[in-house]
Image (cartoon, coloured by chain):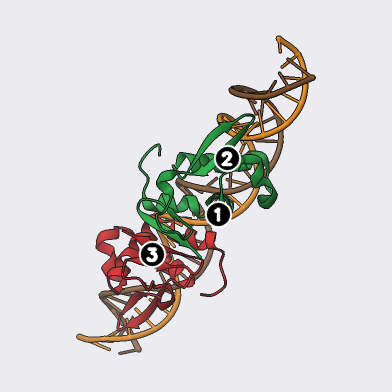
Chain colours: A red, B green, C brown, D orange
Amino acid sequence: MRQKKSCSSLLKILADKTRLAILEQLMEQSKHVSDFGAELQIEQSLLSHHLKILREAGLVTSKRDGKSVLYSIAPEAKTSTSKKGVNLGCCILSFN
Amino acid sequence: MRQKKSCSSLLKILADKTRLAILEQLMEQSKHVSDFGAELQIEQSLLSHHLKILREAGLVTSKRDGKSVLYSIAPEAKTSTSKKGVNLGCCILSFN
DNA sequence: TGTTCATATCAAAATACATTCATGTCAATA
DNA sequence: TATTGACATGAATGTATTTTGATATGAACA
């Protein structure tokens, strides 16, 4: 996480249709950028832009894998519970 | 709740410094509008605007009480757990 | 090394959201 | 019933965020 963020600004990062969908997919499993496409149906550059926001907030990590890049939920953002969730530090979100 | 909202738009409602502070205060106890003032330090009309957004999202309820209006966390937004939290329907937020 | 595939970046345009200010409503009470 | 206190509303403005489109980078491979 580049800099300490307030809880409201962390929530702002989740408060977007696309980014929430990305996180939901990543909670299932790590994915390459091109794998998001099908469900998200957005432009490549927009997807990349949203991934950057998630990366800079420390919610996801990326790792080059040949020509592609593999994205995962950041370890610090993972929840201890078995339910799907995101740990923002200031609060924990649990999805149904 | 006036209309069904997506999870991201519900999160958007929490993703604001002022509204989050309002909810945090209401998680402690119900309050009259004038009681928020001290900690929030915002104009009366702005506070009122934010309360309206929370009301229309179904997160808080209001009830006239003489000259004042009493605000509370909406029953449906309450969490069953003892910890401080908000139930958005699509997900539950738990604060530390 | 030149080309292609996969992804990232940048700046501009579009859209959405927060804030302000003026005014309106509603209940209490003089 | 006129006034005041407490809050709500609406329109205009300011500010932030999202989206687009053009271009750049980096790895693989011919």
Name the subunit of mark 1: B
Chain name for mark 2: B
Residue located beneath label 2 in the image: B49
Query: Type of residue at label 2?
Result: His
Share a chain, discs 3 and 1?
no
Task: Say left or right for C27 vs A96.
Answer: right
Q: Amino acid at mark 3?
A: Ser
Q: Which residue is mark 3?
A: A45
* Other-residue count near label 1 (Cα within 10 Å), few / some / many at <14 / 14–19 / ≥20: some
Q: Residue furthest front?
A: B82
- In the rendered image, the vertical position of residue A48 relative to residue A63, given as above or below: above
Q: Amino acid under label 1? A: Glu
Q: Is residue B54 left or right of residue D28?
A: right
Residue B80 shows up from this direction = yes
Cβ–Cβ below 8 Å for labels 3 and 1?
Answer: no
What residue do we see at 46% from left, 39% from top? B56
Q: Which residue is mark 1?
A: B24
- Could you say where residue B83 lies in the image, as x and y percent from the top left? 46, 61
Circles 2 and 3, Cβ within 8 Å, touching? The answer is no
Whether the residues at callouts 2 and 1 have beta carbons within 8 Å, the answer is no
State the image coordinates of residue B77 (x, y, percent, origin top left): 42, 48
Labels 2 and 3 positioned on one and the same chain: no
A44 over B59 or under it: above or below: below
Q: Residue at x 55, y 41 (%)?
A: B71
Q: Secondary structure at mark 3?
A: helix
